Image (cartoon, rainbow, N blue to C red):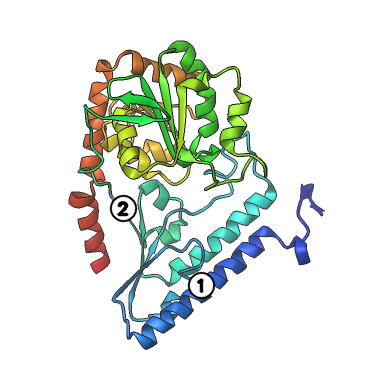
Amino acid sequence: MKVAGYELKAGGGAQTHAYVRDFEGHVRRGQEVVRLLLSLRDKARFQPDVVVSHPGWGESLFLRDIYPGARHIQYCEFYYHATGADVGFDPEFPASLNDQLRVRIKNSTQLQSLVSADAGLSPTAWQQGRYPPELRGKIRVIHDGIDTGVARPDAGASIELAGQRFAAGDEVVTYVARNLEPYRGFHVFMRMLEHLQALRPRSRVIVVGGDEVSYGRPPDAKSTWRQHYTKELEGRVDFGKVVFPGRVPYADYLKVLQVSAAHVYLTYPFVLSWSMLEAMAAGCVLVGSRTAPVEEVIEDGRNGLLVDFFDPTAMARRVADVLARPEAHQALRTQARQTVLERYDLKTVCLPRTLDFLRG
């Protein structure tokens, strides 16, 4: 059906809107949580003082009804917008009207939960600022925290992946995401490699991440984004110098960060990844996208470097310069870790603030 020139999917039966199905799924999850909590409350006599919940998929909808006397805290991770954030950000993947309608329904679940909560908790100021102005006053900004005693520099670090040995001091470019997909700039990173290899032919690249989809949509039913862009760049990128280990154990992931000569972090205007802060804590020279979540943490030239999300050529030049002049960028490594120690350290900053907040 077309309305004012826009194509809308027909509703009803098998054609029910995806966002209607999503909302029904949220209600069902909320009901399942009710069943579990009733059992805890009535059989185990469990009466919490504080309830902390993530509202994104409906689990928080009915918590106040089960524990009316508890203090309810909502984890406010992300409030969707039809424009000005992740939806429609990338012209390569334009948003449809249906996409815009769907995010409104995605928000309805957490809005209902936030209204009934006593307070909210958001990890960054930018994420808090996505929420409606009339509700922002309920939301405190406290990051989950980074264990800087674990995520730390190691000048003697080395790791073997896919039969290749990588060591601190080598020309190693790293990229990490839970899954390799456009939301985290994987497509731009892959296209950068052609330009980077022309500038620094001795460089090697480690790309950590799975082939599933965390955000957005897959390229098609028979492919992954990694396969899609590897095929696109076949013959233009020497993939013998690029290692894709998939997801790796946490200890190996830390080694990847510790051997990194330049770490690239890209993201749509969306939830900031822990991996960026862990990379900084590990003393990486971080080359990040000039997008709002990254700019909250990275000051260009002081604790990292910022690049245009959509410019793989300029990105390659910036990374190549880091590889060519490692000593000139040493101060960025030091200041990157210092930023995390001062603002995001788990034990000295974030955990004490969180505990005070939970106590009310």
Seen at 49% across and 30% down, the residue is 309
- Number of the label disc, if any, that sits on residue 21: none
As rendered, which of 170 and 294 lies closer to the eye?
170
Q: Which residue carries the number 1 mark?
A: 30
Q: Residue 9, located in which quarter of the rendered image?
A: bottom right
- Residue that sits furthest to the right in the current view: 1
Say what amino acid the circle numbered 2 marks: Asp
Say what amino acid the circle numbered 1 marks: Gly
- Residue that sits furthest to the bottom in the current view: 42
Q: Element at badge 1?
A: helix
| Separation of residues labelled 2 and 1 (CA atoms) | 24 Å
The answer to whether any part of residue 12 appears in the image is: no
- Residue that sits furthest to the left in the current view: 348
Q: Compared with residue 13, is residue 99 higher up or lower down, i.e. above or below?
A: above
Rendered location of residue 92, percent (x, y): 63, 34
Q: Residues within 10 Å of mark 1 (few under 14, many from 20)?
A: many
Q: Compared with residue 117, is residue 331 higher up or lower down, i.e. above or below?
A: above
The answer to whether any part of residue 71 appears in the image is: yes
Rendered location of residue 91, percent (x, y): 62, 34
Rendered location of residue 74, percent (x, y): 39, 64
Q: Which residue carries the number 2 mark?
A: 144
Seen at 53% across and 43% down, the residue is 84
As rendered, which of 138 and 308 lies closer to the eye?
308
- Lower sequence index among marks 2 and 1: 1
Q: Compared with residue 360, is residue 77 higher up or lower down, i.e. above or below?
A: above
Quarter the C terminus occupies: bottom left
As rendered, which of 347 and 102 lies closer to the eye?
347
Q: Element at badge 2?
A: loop
**Left or right: 19 as drawn, with respect to 340:** right
Seen at 22% across and 43% down, the residue is 148
Rendered location of residue 211, percent (x, y): 53, 41
Quarter the N terminus occupies: bottom right
